[in-house]
Image (cartoon, rainbow, N blue to C red):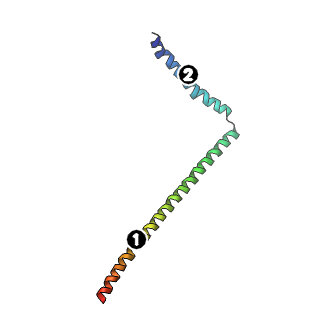
Amino acid sequence: MNLWRKLTIDWPCALGDWLWANLVVAPAMFLDWLTIRRAARIILQFALVMAFFLFFEQIAALHIASLFAVDANAYLDLFAAIFLLVSRGHMRQMLQVAT
């Protein structure tokens, strides 16, 4: 009987008290605490955090773009070296045929 009372009365009442405290009383206390100056400060801090993240996103994008440019330049150097080796072989073959 005691377990049934705990499951049907005590726990739902405790859950209701917790919900009332966190969803009704806490926001009301926050609104009592909030002033125009504090609201402006919170908005400005939020704007600074968002600006920091947008700046970081731009820096990360620049970093990735520079890495791509370095990789593309390395591939270009590699293809140029292969082209020179192949053209050297063709020139050697043309000189052998011409003489």
Label 1 vs label 2, nearer the camera: 1
Q: Nearer the viewer, residue 11 or 28?
A: 11
From the top left corner, tell me how far across and down residue 71 is, in percent.
46, 64
Spot occupied by residue 59 in the image (x, y as percentages of width and height): 56, 56
Give the residue number, with chain letter if any, for mark 1: 79
Quadrant of residue 95 within the rendered picture: bottom left
Q: CA distance from mark 1 to mark 2?
A: 72 Å
Q: Amino acid at mark 1?
A: Phe
Marks 1 and 2, the one that precedes in the sequence:
2
**Which residue appears at 66% of the width and 40% of the height?**
39
Residue at left offset 49%, top offset 61%: 67
> How packed is label 2: few (under 14 Cα within 10 Å), some, or many (20 or more)?
few
Side of 25 relative to 73 (left or right): right
Q: Hey, which residue is sitting farthest left in the picture?
A: 97
**Helix, strand or loop at mark 2:** helix
Residue 95 placement, left or right of 49: left
**For residue 14, above or below residue 81:** above
Mark 1 and 2 residues: CB-CB less than 8 Å, in contact?
no
